[in-house]
Image (tube, rainbow, N blue to C red):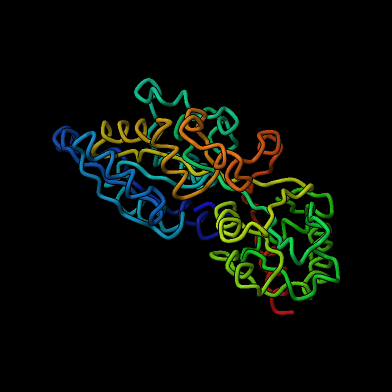
Amino acid sequence: MLKSKYVSLFLSAILVVSTLSLYGCNSSKRSKSGDEKVLNVFTWANYIPDAVVKDFEKDTGIKVNYSPFSSNEEMLTKLQAVNGGQYDVIVCSDYIIQLMTKQKNVLLKPIIKSKIPNFKNVNPVYLKQYYDKTNRYSIPYVAGSEMIVYNSDKIKTPITSYKQLWNPSYKNSIALLDDERSVIGMALKVLGYGINETDPKKLDQAKKLLKKLKPNVKVFDADTPHKSLISGDCNIGVMYGSQASAAVKADPKFKIAYPKEGMNVSIDNFVIPIKAPHEKNAEKFINYMLSGKESSKASKIIEYLNTNTDAKKYMSKSYLNNKAVFIPEKLIKSAQHLVDVGSSNKTYDAIWTEFKQE
């Protein structure tokens, strides 16, 4: 799901040692299964809302089998175990797509855009990204970004930057995501560096800066940081948009701030496995999800950044003004994307471990 993620050495090892045989498929079986009114979807639990799935089943007569995974890494392992088959549509994250298409025998099937007419609805801002520069294998579903939320009843000076979180007056009042790339990346931004920095000297500067932040941190929570604000345990939190939206819905005293140091964005996409048994149904489903109406319905439930230009006409003015769900395009265009930092992962791990143990 849309969290700050990085590719571990474990993943790299999987890709190196994988000896998948992706093309020995029995054509008669593929033809027969391809006519079935079945679709096997593989993604995070509840990521495609049940209401939308039921609409698709009702409108097409295609039965959806929904299989959840807990992480992109789990998804990759399972997809490799079935030689790129079994599943018809997968929704997964940007960086993992890059990994799946780097292999000699790719795990993904090119998506024929002429069979996805609603592809035209995808906001160009989210297309042609680093992980699939021609969108040969992927089509954006939703995006996510981190932002600052603060209790305006307690914090009288509006927060506009990450740098302000180092204010000594915020001692023991901040909730951070329990994610090393998120937190270390925040420090790197304050220093004026990129979030994918590998220079040991610059990382050491980030380490020293984080040490000064630690007295202000009360909670590490990647799943429900907004609850620490709602309960009153914390007055400031760095969190994902869907969590920020939940906080604001709970009480309008919570305000959202886009850090002036810049945003970082991750994009989750629809992909089709190389041996998808029901490819035509997969194309129908992706096209269905890209309709403005269904995209709008899904966004209203899961509250991630909507990537569909046609969806806006189905949304209320108040929803369109939700800063957690609709980030200005100029910020999206200038946002950074997390990528693999290679051998520097060990340095990030060490900085994170020391920071949390202090």
In the rendered image, residue 170, in percent from the top left (x then y), is placed at 80, 70
Q: Where is residue 40 shown, x and y percent of the image?
A: 27, 46
- Occupied quadrant, residue 70: bottom left
Q: Residue at the location (79% across, 47% down)?
A: 260
Q: Quadrant of the C terminus?
A: bottom right
Question: Which residue is situated farthest in the bottom direction here?
Answer: 358
Q: In the picture provided, is 204 more to the left or to the right than 149?
A: right
Q: Who's the residue at 63% across and 70% down the image?
A: 220
Q: Is residue 8 visible?
A: no
Q: Left of 2 or right of it: where is 205? A: right
Residue 216: quarter of image: bottom right
Label total for image:
0
Residue 9, visible in the rendered structure: yes
- 278 on left or right of 190: left
Residue name at image x 26 percent, y 34 percent: 281
- Residue 188 in picture, x, y percent from top left: 78, 55
- State the residue at coordinates (52%, 29%): 309
Tell whether 211 sits left or right of 145.
Answer: right
Up-down: is 310 above or below 26? above
Q: Position of residue 325 (x, y in %)?
A: 57, 45
Residue extending farthest to the top is 114
Q: In which quarter of the view is residue 277 placed?
A: top left
User: Which of 16/242 is in front?
Assistant: 242
